[in-house]
Amino acid sequence: MKKLSNARLLFGHDLLEVLTAKPTPAFSNDTLDFLCLLSDAGLKFCKSNPDYSEYSSFFFWIRLNNLLNIHKKYPSFLFGRGLSFHIAPANVPANLLYTLVFGLLAGNPSIIRGSERIEEQLKPIFKLINKIIGECTFSQLPLFSCISYPRDQDLNAYLSSLANVRLIWGGDDTVSYFKSLSTLNTCVDITFPSKTSYTYIDKDLFDKLDTKAKLSCFQRLASDIELYSQNACSSPIALVIKSSSSYHSNSFFSQLSCELQKLAINKKKNSVDSFYSASDASISLIEPPLGVHRSPYLNIFFYKHEQINEIIALKRPSNSLLYACYVRKFSDFNPPLTAQTITLLPHSAESALNLYYEIECSSINRIVPAGRAIDMHLLWDGYDIIAMSTKHLTFK
Amino acid sequence: MNLSDYLACSNPSMPIDQDFFDQLLQRHFHHSVNCLEYCKVSNNLFLASSNNITDLPYLSARNFKAHNLLSVPESQIFKVLQSSGTSGNSPSKIFLDKFNARNQSIALSKLFTSYTGLQRPNILIVDSPAVSSRTASFTARKAGILGFSSLCRKSYHALDEKYNIDADQILRSINESDQLLVFGFTSIIWEFFASLSANSKIQFKNKTVLLHGGGWKKLTNLGITDEQFKSKLFQNYKINDVKSYYGMVEQTGSIFFECSHGFYHSNSFASIIPRNQVTLLPELNINVPSLCQVLSVLPTSYPGFSILTDDLISVKHFSDCPCGLKGIAFVVNGRIPTAEIRGCSDTFQP
């Protein structure tokens, strides 16, 4: 078919077969079996290939026990809505894998548009997937194709016109563009426009933690910052520090920097990107920071809390650059309507709920402890992705 | 000592000394006052005072792609150099005023004479005249060709406008020259001599120096080593003086020539600081692949005197290279894995 000629299969089933495939029940046994095999193979692969260690959390997430627990939270008679078209983001390669799993768990035949950049990074994982579907037969596994193609408005329009569900990742421009294309009246769009995320620190409470708890917080926060170089929309880009004292010790930032240094050394990560981001932000930002914490692994530019939103709009930080402000109470800083995830230090369910009511930002949908900011889940951006991608069958 | 005096009295092959550091400090103060962008980076990311050459602030080579960085009024700019900017990547833009461009020529001339021993030779440019035509954009390749051509008497092009071998021009360059510089970009030189091998009539004379630069990446991909490269040139064409150089459009004029032992050498106009890839601290050990910070006394119209590149180098000798030349001797290992692919050798599209 001419319209599909630009599409190149990265992994999965034949694209034409996927286009005509039928949906299956959500959480079908075959889907769970397939994901269980992929989880085992993936975890082994990550263990023997340290460069891919960041994908181990994905393979751990799709382990059978976890999926069975998730399944329990959904009603019994859920069925895929039909063809699901996914626009995977290029900034976080692992999202391509997550969005595939969301489609499969929902029971939808899935077409995922990936990028060549992602292909370079995920090639060995694509091979694992192809190997499993080549060796085993899964009658109730929804068919899927991950494809890449150069700019092709006709193909975007064609695949959109056939889709029953679209998962559109990748920021404001991508979402606006795909929403402008014609779709079936019944097509459900789950969109993920550009988001920003923050870490709120109650310094007085944090200082009361014991050394071990503090260290754990630093390690987890460092992981949230480092894992996707802050390209993930839920990675913190600014610190909001509530403190009753006017004296601010540098030891907090030094210890955070120390944990980032350990991650950099473990991953043999060079610091050029980090330096570039900090120098680029220095050049781009009109207002000089009030203070700077500098190291090869972490740069923090301090501003007044009134300036933070404007500064982020001018230059979104990445590669271990953070903006920070001090406040007397958390409500002094108003996050913008792009805000998504808040990492709270120290965290408790009660303090998270109190914070949600205190800051009154309607777009925030996650307040999590350090180390959980980038945990992907079927509840994302306030959506229940399974509920939206399936239909609930009623038999009377 | 001002820059003009320094250039006039420097012996390029002398080791780095206090005068070199003083020149760099002068550049630091000049750019801090005259380039707001440099001043911001310096203030935000570096210590207030530089007591040592390794304390000097630097910019990232990528800053020159994202921003127009000048240290003189825009009205004084007469030439804008551009890096090759391979597909999808923005090129670096380097803004030159006449003073900066003149100093580049002076430094290049001194380095060239000192390292090649040639005095105003003729030049055989292994490239097409199209690359350096008036209408062509001012790329690193064009800058290299024009820069070296300006040091030579008469120019010949080994390739015609359509990148075909121009045997007549090649033979003329050999017959009409007592001293001949054969110059081009590494991968183009290799492709040129590989296609030339069928024509056995071409034999170069004794006083021929082949100078090439622009990266070894394509040849590494072809599995060709430096030894094979030199051996082929000697066996087939009797060229026994083959030198490469390491340089970049961000610091045109101050380049690093290869010594007889195959190492690039710092000189009195330009030096390097190897930096640990993770800590960015100066790497004090030899043979450790390190990030390359390049230093040059020349950039005055743009803040490029101290740049952290995306290149990896390994220092072989900090001061005592067996070739006898002074300065830091190093090899280039390539680019950091995540860095965008660039370089003149990646732009050749016949």
Image (tube, coloured by chain):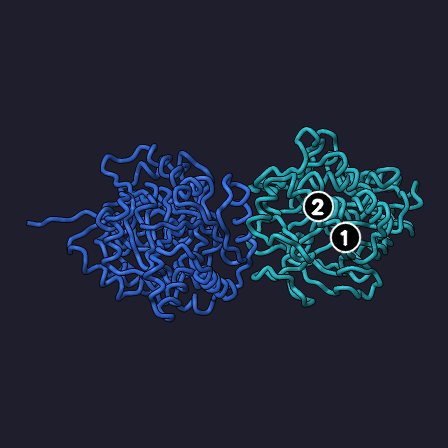
Chain colours: A blue, B cyan
Using the image, tell me which numbered label, if any, was put on residue B151: none
B197 vs A155, left or right, is right
Q: Residue at x 67, y 49 (%)?
A: B306
Q: Which chain letter matches label 1?
A: B
Which residue is at the front of the view, B21 or B114? B21
Local secondary structure at mark 1 = helix
Residue A105 position in % (x across, y down): 27, 55
The N terminus of chain A sits in image quarter: top left
* Crowd band around label 1 with a 10 angstrom C-alpha radius: few (<14), some (14–19), many (20+): many
Q: Amino acid at mark 1?
A: Phe
Q: Chain of mark 2?
A: B
The picture places residue B207, in percent across and down from the top left corner, at 91, 50
Residue B88 falls left or right of residue A174:
right
- Residue in the image at 23% along x and 46% along y: A388
Cα–Cα span, label 1 and label 2? 11 Å
Whether A128 is drawn above or below B145: the answer is below
| Residue B27 badge | 2
